[in-house]
Amino acid sequence: MSTTPIGISDHRDAIEKGARLGYLARAAVFITIGYFAFRTAFAGGTTLSEEEAISRIVGSPFGGVMLVLLVVALPCFALWRFVQAVFDADGYGTGAKGIFVRIGRFVSGLAYVFLALYAASLLFGVSVGGGQGGSDVLNRWGAILGPWFTLPAGLVMLGVAGSQLKKAWDGSFLRFLSLPPAHARWMIAICRFGLAARGMVFAAIAVLFFTGASRWTPDHTPGLEDALGEIGSWPYGWLLLSATGLGLVAFGAYALLLSLYGRIRSPDLDPSEVIRKARSGA
């Protein structure tokens, strides 16, 4: 007989289901971005940001249903990222590497909060952009702060790119997956390809930060579509962009596999346990 209190078991199940739903939304976004990047390499057109990918999904058949699902699923993924970061759901610990990874999870959570808000704005017809607000301050100081902001940001992006490539190479991502043995080989190959492609995108963002220190400011930083455009401008760019597009589709498939076969380690969020640990450490 289980000794886990029913309430704790329930919230663990809810967190796991929310995380799986969130990975599904992430898969849809990256598959869309990858498809349009691949098509751009051969047929022209423009690459997409995450927001534009959501708009494309909404414009597809059953777009209204998809939009409702995204409005539900994207906040679930953001919440899961915050749980991973704050409660160390993945067991990275409090060492330098663990803290770096958990900060990355938290920043990812913030990014998906904004994506969720954008999706909600499409659903309810409310603008989340709009006025200038405090951007005048950033515009005024952008020329001065540019190099101080962009060079460290470029180093961070380069570190993220290296971590993605390392995961693709050493297969450390497999500890978060429980793949069916009969299909594991080709599934792992897709995951490696997707992670490597995402690493290339982060490397391109790092290049943009390093080569455009006066151009990028805290209110105007290079994003995914800028990175894909940069890759397309390199020698043999059409080939690299098409490969990266396919890779981002593969990364979307990796997110889909996490939704289906991921080992979601939902932590115990029982407040009494948190209080007990805090008191014992005092």
Image: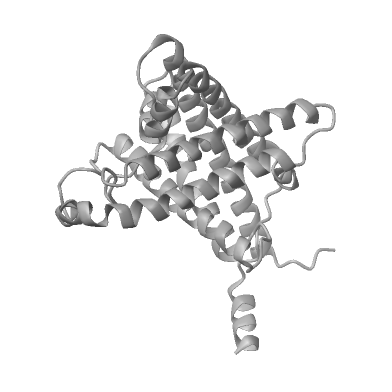
Residue drawn at x 47%, y 16% as measured from the top left: 238
Which quadrant of the rendered structure holds the C terminus? bottom right
Please state the horizontal and vertical placement of residue 208, each as a whole percent of the image.
38, 39
Classify residue 12 by image quadrant.
bottom right
- In the image, residue 165 above or below residue 53: below
Please state the horizontal and vertical placement of residue 131, each as a whole percent of the image.
15, 46
Classify residue 93 by image quadrant.
bottom right
- In the image, residue 7 above or below residue 50: below
Asked whether, in this view, residue 74 is left or right of residue 223, the answer is: right
Q: How is the image coloured?
A: one colour
Residue drawn at x 38%, y 44% as measured from the top left: 209
Tell me if residue 243 can be seen: yes
* Count of numbered labels shown in the rendering: 0
Asked whether, in this view, residue 244 is left or right of residue 136, the answer is: right
Residue drawn at x 73%, y 41% as measured from the top left: 171
Asked whether, in this view, residue 144 is left or right of residue 83, the answer is: left
Residue reaching furthest to the top: 43
Which quadrant of the rendered structure holds the N terminus? bottom right
Tell me if residue 64 can be seen: no
Please state the horizontal and vertical placement of residue 220, each as a whole percent of the image.
28, 45
**Front in this rendered view, residue 61 or 50:** 50
Please state the horizontal and vertical placement of residue 6, each as a whole percent of the image.
69, 63
